[in-house]
Image (cartoon, rainbow, N blue to C red):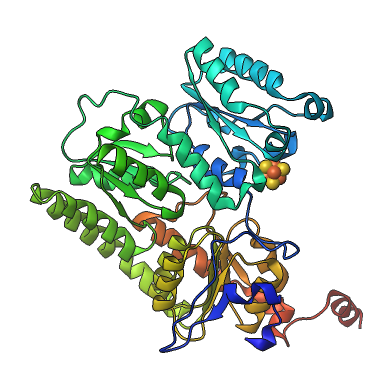
C-alpha cells in the first residue's frame, strides 16, 4: 500500500484484501479534519431517515443553508401527500444567535401546523442550535400540548458525531412515535419494512412481493411512511430491516420494548432479494403456503430476467468496478450483483460501515480489492486510477470524481430516479451499468491513453 501515499492518520481505515490474512479496518470514528471526507453530517443522517415520512412536517431549526439540500431533489416517492418535499427552515440570523432562537421556532411551528395540518412534526436541531443552547425539547412539548399534534425534537446537531449519530437521533425520534397507536386488526402474518426509503417507488415493489406471499405490511419506515402506521408498528410480528446501519437502533428498541424480533435483509441483486423473501416466509413456519408463494415469485421473476442478464454479462465480463456508498450493507449486495454481471469489484467502501460489515466485505471480495472506510475524493480517484476501474458506483458526491477521472458512473444513492431494488431493479441496474461502462465516450478519456485527442489538435488537423 506504500505507493498509494495516503495520509498517515488514514492508513488504518484502508486495506487490501489478501488471501489467508485477516484485514482489520479501523472504522466508526470521526472524520479526520483536513481529509475532506465524503461523509455527510449528523443532521444529514437524521434527515435521510426521517424525511420520507410524507404526512409529517419537517422543520430545520438553524440557518437556511442547512436546509438547502432539500428532499425535493431526492427520489423518495409518496403515494399520497407531498408535505415531505417542502423544505422549511427557521432561518436563524445573527440576532437569533445572540438572543436565542426558541421564540422563532415556536412561531414557525405554530404557523406551519396551522397552515399544513400535519400528522406530526419533526424539528431538526442543527449545529448552531447546539451552540446557543435553545431548549428545542421544551418548545416541542409546548406546541404538542397547544396544538394537539406530536412535535418531536431530533437532536441532530451537525458536530455531535458522524452521519451514523444522525441515524441514532432519527431512531430516537421514531421510537417516541411507535407504540402510540391502536394495533387492533393487525393480523398474525404481519411485518414492518424498515430502512427502505422508496427511491423511485422501490418500496411499492417490495411491498407487492410480500403481499403476494400473503404477508400484511403494517408500516413502511420510512419510505412512503405515514405517521399513523408508525404509531401502530408495534403490532407487527416481525421487523424486516434493510439499510441496517440506519435502522437497527429502532429495531433493537422495538425488540426490547415490544418483543418484536427483527431480521436484516437487502433488496439489491437477485440473491439478496430472493433471500429477503425466503427469510420472511421462514419466520412464519405455521403458514407453509407463504414459502410456497415466495418460491413461485422468485422462480417467475428470475426466469424472466436471466436472458437479458446473460447478454449483459457477455459484454461486461471482466470489467472492473469500484463501490463507495453510504451503508456497507449495500456494498455487500453490490459486490454480489456485479459478480452476476461478470464484473469484478476492485474497491469497496462506505461512509458508515462497522467492523462486521468490513469483515463480510473482506470475505466476499477477491484478493487485491481495496476496502476503505470514510474515504475522501483524493483517495477515491487515486485508487480508481491505480486499479484501472471501468465503473464507479456511488452517490451525488462521487459522480464528479468518476467523470473527472474518466470512468463510467452508476448512481446508487437517494437522488436517483430509477428503481434498483427488487428483481425489476436488477434489470435496471444491469442496463445502467452496461450503458455507462460500454459507452464509446470513454475512448476519448485521457485515462485510457492513445485514443484521446485534445480539442485544439483536432481543429488543427481539420484545417489541414
Ligand atoms: S454540519 Fe452543521 S451547519 Fe453544516 S449542514 Fe450540518 S448541521 Fe448545518
**Residue 203 visible in the current orientation:** yes
The spot of residue 202 in percent (x, y) is: 41, 47
Q: Is residue 440 above or below residue 367?
A: above
Choose between 57 and 442: the one closer to the eye.
Answer: 57
The spot of residue 345 in percent (x, y) is: 49, 76
Choose between 189 and 357: the one closer to the eye.
Answer: 357
Answer with the quarter of the image where residue 401 lies: bottom right
* Quadrant holding the N terminus: bottom right
Tell me the residue at 72%/37% (across/down): 131
Q: Number of numbered discs present?
A: 0
The spot of residue 304 in percent (x, y) is: 29, 61
Q: Is residue 284 above or below residue 388?
A: above
Tell me the residue at 54%/68% (across/down): 349
Q: Quadrant of ligand 1?
A: top right
Q: Residue furthest top?
A: 146
Tell me the residue at 57%/26% (across/down): 137
* Quadrant holding the C terminus: bottom right
Tell me the residue at 33%/56% (across/down): 265
Choose between 59 and 414: the one closer to the eye.
Answer: 59
Residue 279 as seen in the image, left or right of residue 112:
left
Residue 228 as seen in the image, left or right of residue 159:
left
The spot of residue 189 in percent (x, y) is: 18, 40
**Residue 195 visible in the current orientation:** no
Residue 25 as seen in the image, left or right of residue 280:
right
Answer with the quarter of the image where residue 269 lies: bottom left
Amino acid at each position: 500500500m506504500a505507493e498509494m501515499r495516503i495520509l498517515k492518520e488514514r492508513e488504518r481505515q484502508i486495506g487490501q484484501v489478501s488471501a489467508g490474512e485477516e484485514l482489520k479496518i479501523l472504522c466508526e470514528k470521526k472524520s479526520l479534519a483536513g481529509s475532506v471526507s465524503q461523509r455527510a453530517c449528523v443532521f444529514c443522517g437524521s434527515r435521510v431517515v426521517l424525511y420520507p415520512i410524507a404526512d409529517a412536517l419537517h422543520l430545520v431549526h438553524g440557518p437556511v443553508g442547512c436546509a438547502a439540500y432539500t428532499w425535493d431533489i431526492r427520489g423518495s416517492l409518496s403515494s399520497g401527500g407531498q408535505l415531505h418535499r417542502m423544505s422549511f427552515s427557521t432561518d436563524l440570523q445573527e440576532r437569533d444567535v445572540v438572543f436565542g432562537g426558541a421564540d422563532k421556532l415556536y412561531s414557525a411551528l405554530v404557523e406551519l401546523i396551522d397552515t399544513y395540518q400535519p400528522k406530526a412534526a419533526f424539528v431538526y436541531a442543527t449545529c448552531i442550535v447546539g451552540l446557543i443552547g435553545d431548549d428545542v425539547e421544551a418548545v416541542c412539548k409546548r406546541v404538542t400540548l397547544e396544538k394537539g399534534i406530536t412535535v418531536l425534537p431530533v437532536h441532530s446537531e451537525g458536530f455531535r458525531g458522524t452521519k451514523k449519530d444522525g441515524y441514532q437521533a432519527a431512531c430516537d425520534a421514531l421510537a417516541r412515535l411507535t407504540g402510540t397507536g391502536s394495533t387492533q386488526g393487525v393480523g398474525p402474518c404481519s411485518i414492518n419494512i424498515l430502512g427502505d426509503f422508496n427511491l423511485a417507488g422501490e418500496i411499492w415493489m417490495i411491498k407487492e412481493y410480500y403481499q403476494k406471499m400473503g404477508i400484511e405490511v403494517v408500516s413502511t419506515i420510512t419510505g412512503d411512511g405515514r405517521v399513523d402506521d408508525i404509531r401502530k408498528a408495534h403490532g407487527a410480528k416481525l421487523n424486516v430491516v434493510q439499510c441496517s446501519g440506519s435502522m437497527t437502533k429502532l429495531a433493537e428498541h422495538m425488540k426490547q420494548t415490544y418483543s418484536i424480533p427483527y431480521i436484516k435483509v437487502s433488496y439489491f441483486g437477485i440473491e439478496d432479494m430472493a433471500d429477503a423473501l425466503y427469510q420472511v416466509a421462514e419466520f412464519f413456519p405455521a403458514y407453509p403456503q407463504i414459502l410456497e408463494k415466495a418460491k413461485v415469485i422468485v422462480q417467475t421473476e428470475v426466469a424472466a430476467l436471466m436472458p437479458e442478464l446473460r447478454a449483459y454479462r457477455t459484454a461486461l465480463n471482466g470489467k472492473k468496478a469500484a463501490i463507495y456508498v453510504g451503508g456497507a450493507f449495500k456494498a455487500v449486495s453490490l459486490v454480489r450483483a456485479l459478480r452476476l454481471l461478470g464484473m469484478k469489484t476492485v474497491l469497496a467502501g462506505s461512509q458508515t460501515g462497522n467492523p462486521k460489515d468490513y469483515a463480510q466485505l473482506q470475505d466476499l471480495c477477491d484478493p487485491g480489492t481495496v476496502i476503505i472506510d470514510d474515504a475522501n475524493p483524493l483517495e477515491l480517484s487515486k485508487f480508481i486510477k491505480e486499479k484501472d476501474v471501468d465503473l464507479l458506483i456511488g452517490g451525488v458526491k462521487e459522480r464528479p470524481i468518476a467523470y473527472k477521472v474518466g470512468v463510467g458512473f452508476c448512481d446508487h444513492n437517494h437522488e436517483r430516479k430509477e428503481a434498483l431494488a427488487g428483481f425489476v431493479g436488477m434489470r435496471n441496474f444491469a442496463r445502467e451499468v452496461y450503458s455507462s461502462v460500454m459507452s464509446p465516450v470513454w475512448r476519448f478519456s485521457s485515462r485510457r491513453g492513445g485514443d484521446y485527442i485534445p480539442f485544439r489538435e483536432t481543429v488543427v488537423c481539420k484545417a489541414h
